[in-house]
Amino acid sequence: MITVLAGGVGGSKFIHGLSLLDITNSVAIINTGDDIEKFGLYVSPDIDINIYRLANVIHEQGWGFEGDTYQFQEILSTIYQEDCWFNLGDKDIATHIYRSNLLKEGYSLSEITQKMCEKFNTNIAILPMSNNPVSTYVDTPDGEYHFQEYLIKRRMSDKVHSIKLAGIEEALPAPGVLEAINESSIIFIAPSNFYVSINPILSIPGVREAIKNSNAKVIGISPIIGGNAVKGPLAKMMKDFNVEISPYGVAQLYDGLLDGFIIDHQDHDCKADIQNLDISVLTTNTILDTEEQKETLIREALLFVENL
Amino acid sequence: MITVLAGGVGGSKFIHGLSLLDITNSVAIINTGDDIEKFGLYVSPDIDINIYRLANVIHEQGWGFEGDTYQFQEILSTIYQEDCWFNLGDKDIATHIYRSNLLKEGYSLSEITQKMCEKFNTNIAILPMSNNPVSTYVDTPDGEYHFQEYLIKRRMSDKVHSIKLAGIEEALPAPGVLEAINESSIIFIAPSNFYVSINPILSIPGVREAIKNSNAKVIGISPIIGGNAVKGPLAKMMKDFNVEISPYGVAQLYDGLLDGFIIDHQDHDCKADIQNLDISVLTTNTILDTEEQKETLIREALLFVENL
């Protein structure tokens, strides 16, 4: 059994590789710290990105529904004068309404996510990290913002002083999360933002300990390639936190959790430093734009683990 | 001051005439017995039809938003396997989400309707008949259906035994309803379905009495033209209830409320029978497809009242 910890865009590409190779004994534990309520609808961006990706209905921009339109939002902004900085496409709204109604009916996020996996016919189980609300806030010189507001409305323009995971102390791992970790022989930490995707998962009481105590090999894939993040604010945040913007910097953030780390050819000069942290290193292509690249990386990662 | 009692498609065309002539001291009291909750959203079809009509954004089919698309519904039905017999367009959804959220925040339907009138810049006040839930059910040989289900899903195919207005005894007239009736010199009963649009309004405790006791001239416009309803199930229902399908049949249903009745040229042979009910009759064109037809009817109706 394989467990993957992941956020949205970057992580979903890695999980897509497992799906393409039909490695169906995999469980993806997905960050829900980005979840937000907009216009009365509960939106779970990272879960949606992963399910849409696995179902091959993801928009080419990396999130949202392919071929989506924005008629709903046009009326909401022009006539009802609502501030529509958070993009909700017309197709995508179906997901938010479906989920929001089931939540109102008393279903848990886990149960709804499982239903969605069935509806979209994914071959990999997607689990929310928790059924309890966790909200990621970013503290900036201009005040505190929900991560989505910082990311989308403020276009990551603020210096980040610190990141707060509201609700994390009270959050329980969702059903299946600890079981997946305990039963897995490999735990992949997908190429996602450490601060706002991976750390929320690791910070749920019990999760980091379960990973530490498991017999699984823990393998990270660097979200930093050639000095930058493929997508999102990770590099900016590392700079704000005075962390070296390199796979070596990321490896240090995982703080003793990794048995192996997969880095891009571009970063081969980090290899020795990472190995000095007692972490095995695989240097390969980690850019995951095509299906072939995704499948190749998964095959190489599985071989890498076998030889650890 | 002029008050109009109305339902959706037919009634909105008459109210549109008042709006076109900028007769802004008018209040339209709109049926809310058709209101329904779909996918967790509160939908108020007759209010929306009237506001969209006054704002000139009505779809040419007579309800919904012009140029609307159905991407939301396509995903909800194909992927989430929801039964989407009740059409919700992508633009239209903005209205339902806007209203539903304000209801959740504690605003009344009246307050929300007023906000919508402001957003859509209507020059006539639209009032819901009540802020309390009233639901119109149709009893048929196959069981009881919400009016919308009978109308849309079952395409008016059932024989109607009776019509139930659930909640009507506990419903209070919405703020402004009795005041409008009391202060008006003319009360128009728009060419709407008696059973499911006008009767719900008249059946709210206090409304029929207020109209009876008011000094206003009460003028109906026949929704039956040439032996059929311009739109909707009125003629079918009259047949099921053994009522003559003619303006004379409709005039009888109003049961002593009318001072005058406006009927179409096609129905001039009803004139004497209606006059025998002690109701003055204006025979003219009552088909309201064009702006010119609407404006002409309003002008003629106002002259008719003056000469009563």
Image (cartoon, coloured by chain):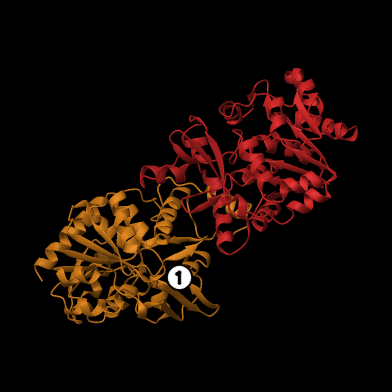
Chain colours: A orange, B red
Name the image quarter holding residue A246: bottom left
Q: Position of residue A109 (x, y in %)?
A: 35, 63
Residue beneath the point at 62% across and 45% down: B48
Image vertical order of residue A155 relative to residue A272, above or below: above
Image vertical order of residue B77 relative to residue B237, above or below: below
Name the image quarter holding residue A128: bottom left
Image vertical order of residue B39 relative to residue A34, above or below: above
Q: Position of residue B85 (x, y in %)?
A: 45, 39
Q: Amino acid at mark 1?
A: Phe
User: Looking at this view, is A123 or A223 the one in front?
Assistant: A123
Return the chain for callout 1: A
Q: Position of residue B288 (x, y in %)?
A: 71, 29
Q: Which residue is mark 1?
A: A147
Name the image quarter holding residue B4: top right
Answer yes or no: is residue A272 visible: no
Q: Residue furthest right?
A: B307
Left or right? Give the position of B173 relative to A101: right
Q: Quadrant of the C terminus of chain B?
A: top right
Local packing at callout 1 (Cα closer than 10 Å; few below 14, some 14-19, many 20+) is many
Left or right? Give the position of A139 relative to B230: left
Answer yes or no: is residue A12 visible: yes
User: Looking at this view, is A114 or A2 the one in front?
Assistant: A114
Residue beneath the point at 58% across and 53% down: B133
User: Looking at this view, is A74 or B95 the one in front?
Assistant: B95
Residue beneath the point at 55% across and 62% down: B104
Residue beneath the point at 25% across and 51% down: A291
**Count of marks, rendered view:** 1
Left or right? Give the position of A212 relative to A173: left
Q: Position of residue B280 (x, y in %)?
A: 83, 29
Q: Helix, strand or loop at disc 1?
A: helix
User: Looking at this view, is B149 or A103 the one in front?
Assistant: B149
